[in-house]
Every structure is written in C-alpha cells, then in structure tokens.
Amino acid sequence: MGEPQEWHFAFDFYPLQSPEHTRIWPFFQHLKEGRLTTTRCAKCSSLLWQPRVVCPHCNADAMEWVDLPRHGRIYAFTAVYAGAPLGLEKDVPFVVAIVELDGVPVKVVARIDEARYEDLKIGDPVTLKIVELADGRVWFRFVPTGKPSSPA
Ligand SMILES: [Zn+2]
C-alpha cells in the first residue's frame, strides 16, 4: 500500500475542474497557463466575476474569456487563526484578503501568501500566484509585490 490519501483543498468554488464537470473549465486551464481570467458578456459587455456561463444582467449565454490584471491592491484583509476549512488546518495562521485588481472593477477573495497579518496594510500591492495542487487541480493566491511567488 502507498501513502495514505492526502486531501487537498484550495478555496475553489468548483472542486471539479474538467470540461465534463463544469462549463467554466477554461478558467482552470487559463490558471495552468499562468493567467487569471474571467468572462465578459458578449451581448451587453458586462465584465463578470466570478466567471459565468449566463449573464446575470441580460441573461445572454454568449461569453468571451478575458484576462484580468496580475496585480492589485489589498482592499480588506483578515487572518484565519482557527476554524480553517477542512484541509487547511495545518496552514493557520494565514491571511485572506479582498484584492482590488488594477484597472478593472473586479475584487477577488484570495489567500495572501508569504506575508503575516501584522506586516500588511490596506492598499499594499500584491501579485498573482498560481498554486498547483498535488492532484493536478489549480487555484490562485496573491503574494506581496516583490516577494518571490514560487509555486507552493
Ligand atoms: Zn449581458
């Protein structure tokens, strides 16, 4: 027998990332290419976050994938010391932030790696970090701009 199965969690909104499981599978494919992307409605041009398959504004289902900036600023943040989601208990304490992406009206919730809560402040610049899990899934976090962003 091999090692015991280790579970991996990533705050992802759909743990099943392949085309047969989710119609937003290109989001995950793009992450594997180092790109944070979302959908824009092809009919009313609304930029949507999270990625959608139907526009909540006009109900159109024609979407185009667009790249989001790799950089943003901390809009709000907190730290998780206890009660972490299943699979993340070993990571405490860790920082979770709302990141306002540069130049687009999009705020995303993500973990901030390589930073302690005490060292951060609102407005700090952060840079996208792609996290690849052992089971092949992928997700995103941010790191303070200027810090190394090597994969976890
Ligand atoms: Zn629309």
Image: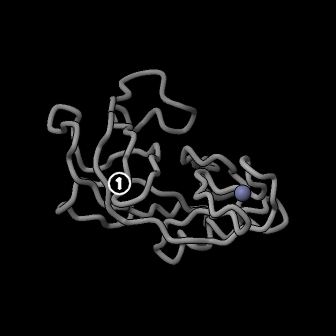
Q: Between 148 and 89, which is closer to the camera in this rendering?
A: 148
- Tell me, what colour scheme is on the image? one colour
Q: What residue does disc 1 label? A: 142
Place of residue 88 in the rendered image (x, y in percent of width and height, measured from the top left): 48, 38
Seen as rendered, the residue at the extreme top is 82
User: For the residue labelled by badge 1, is the local secondary structure a helix, a strand or a loop?
Assistant: strand
Please determine whether, in this image, residue 77 is positioned above or below residue 134: above
Give the tally of numbered discs.
1
As drawn, 15 above or below 70: above
- Image quarter where the C terminus lies is bottom left
Outermost residue, bottom side: 33
Crowd rating for badge 1 (residues with CA inside 10 Å; few <14, some 14–19, many 20+):
many
Looking at the rendering, in which quadrant would you find the N terminus? Answer: bottom right
- Residue at screen point 63% across, 63% down: 45
- Residue 16 falls in which quadrant of the image? bottom right
The amino acid marked with disc number 1 is: Phe
Q: Quadrant of residue 136?
A: bottom right
Task: Look at the numbered disc 1 and say if its residue's Cβ is closer than 8 Å to ligand 1.
Answer: no
Q: Residue at x 22, y 45 (%)?
A: 115
Q: Residue at x 39, y 40 (%)?
A: 98
Whether residue 72 sits left or right of residue 13 in the image: it is left
Residue 41 screen position, x and y as percent: 68, 63
Q: Position of residue 2 (x, y in %)?
A: 64, 58
In the displayed structure image, the side of residue 49 where residue 74 appears, left or right: left
Q: Which percent across, then down, holds residue 63? A: 72, 67
